[in-house]
Image (cartoon, rainbow, N blue to C red):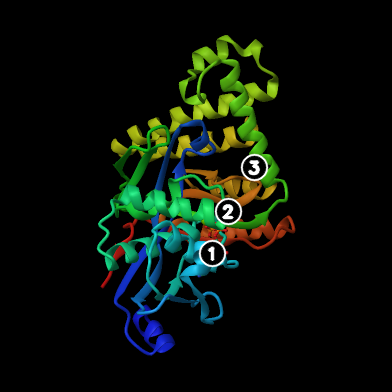
Amino acid sequence: MDIKELFTRSFGYRPEVIASAPGRVNLIGEHIDYSQGYVLPFAIDAVTKCAIAVRSDRRIRIISAQKENEIIESNLGNIAVKQGSAWSKYVYGVIWAMEIDSGLDIHVDGRVPLGAGLSSSAALECSLATALDHLFHLERSPVELARLAQRAENDYVGVPCGIMDQSISLMGRAGYGLLLDCQDLSTRHVKIDFAAQNLKLLIIDTQVHHALSDGGYAKRRQSCEQVAKIFSIPSLRQLSMVNLLAHKSKLSDIEFKRARHGVSEMARVLEAVEVLEGKDFGALGQLLNRSHDSLRDDYEVSCPELDLAVTTALKGGALGARMVGGGFGGSAIALINEGDAGAISLAIERAFAGKGFKAPRFFDSLPSDGAKVIS
Ligand code: ADP
Ligand code: MG
């Protein structure tokens, strides 16, 4: 059933607006957003859709096809004091951040897998933000909407995410990645012509979430901040590799390794843009491999499952592969020839079974369009 029919069945009348927004994958630029570095994500073809209608009272009714299709009722007064539980907070957060002052009926249906590191949360927020912007003729820019969606997740849901996920979900373009400079939030679309070479990106969800991840993340951030302090600079963005190597003795071994990841990863993102523009996908694969090595050895955020996914993909003929996201679990990506997808997935499945790891899940996608109003 499509989203219009779902809405009509749930609420007994037709929606006024339908919008969609995609999940994303970050091609390269890992663990450097908080060091004012660059990231290069693209939107995937899986989207979350929402259908909305305005109510004449102050009630808010929401329902998700992914959450038992049960209507949850609230009102604008509850939202003003940030009430709500679990998934409803993502919806209320967007209503709150956009300062919507009207009752609403909202139906959500998402095809972005929840909690797989493909940012179903941003897909949900951005589909809502796009629909509400259209419904109330707010005419906010994609950058403004990204900030509002981020504020919903930071200040209402309470997840301290950066602005990458919302930016790419709103600004994605089929066949392009988005180079986002985390220092000034400027963006540039970069052509990613995988399809012309019969390539695609395989996404391997290890289904592992190690308890280490939260503390590990905070510690990594602290190390980067400490190095910036030692060099008296705002962030690793202002540090060159030459300077880092010349002053290695000022740092502990750990600090040096963490900084070397940050500085080298920033250079790899810019190199990736260059090789993408020259359609040199072999070179792109090498950059993905070097990113993984750096995350594993210098940043120490990989884990046996991620390493096995990467090495097995490479053995099966991938041009390159790396872990993505915070680490200690989550997903890996592999740049592969379209025709190899089945064999590589099977090899990874078998390798995981052989080690007694949980069965992985697979997705694949080409760079796709960002959020849009459908009707
Ligand atoms: P990710 O963004 O990587 O998928 P998160 O934990 O950041 O993982 O966000 C997942 C959460 O977002 C879900 O647990 C749920 O609360 C909410 N969510 C995302 N998509 C939907 C949906 N279609 N319906 C209901 N809730 C959703
Ligand atoms: Mg998320």
Q: Count the numbered circles shown.
A: 3
Kindly check if marks 1 and 3 are in contact, taking CB atoms under 8 A apart as contact.
no
- State the SS at label 2: loop
Residue 123 visible in image: no
Kindly check if marks 2 and 1 are in contact, taking CB atoms under 8 A apart as contact.
yes
Percent of width and height locating residue 270: 39, 31
First of labels 1, 3 by sequence position? 1
- State the SS at label 1: helix
Q: Label 3, on which residue?
A: 302
Res. 208 mark: none
- Pick the residue in front: 265 or 35: 35
Q: Label 1, on which residue?
A: 89
- Distance CA(mark 2)–CA(mark 1): 9 Å
**Number of other residues with Cα within 10 Å of mark 1, as a class: few under 14, some 14 to 19, many 20 or more:** many
First of labels 2, 1 by sequence position? 1
Percent of width and height locating residue 324: 54, 46
Ligand 1 has an atom within 8 Å of the beta carbon of the residue at disc 1 = yes
Percent of width and height locating residue 371: 33, 60
- Pick the residue in front: 176 or 171: 171
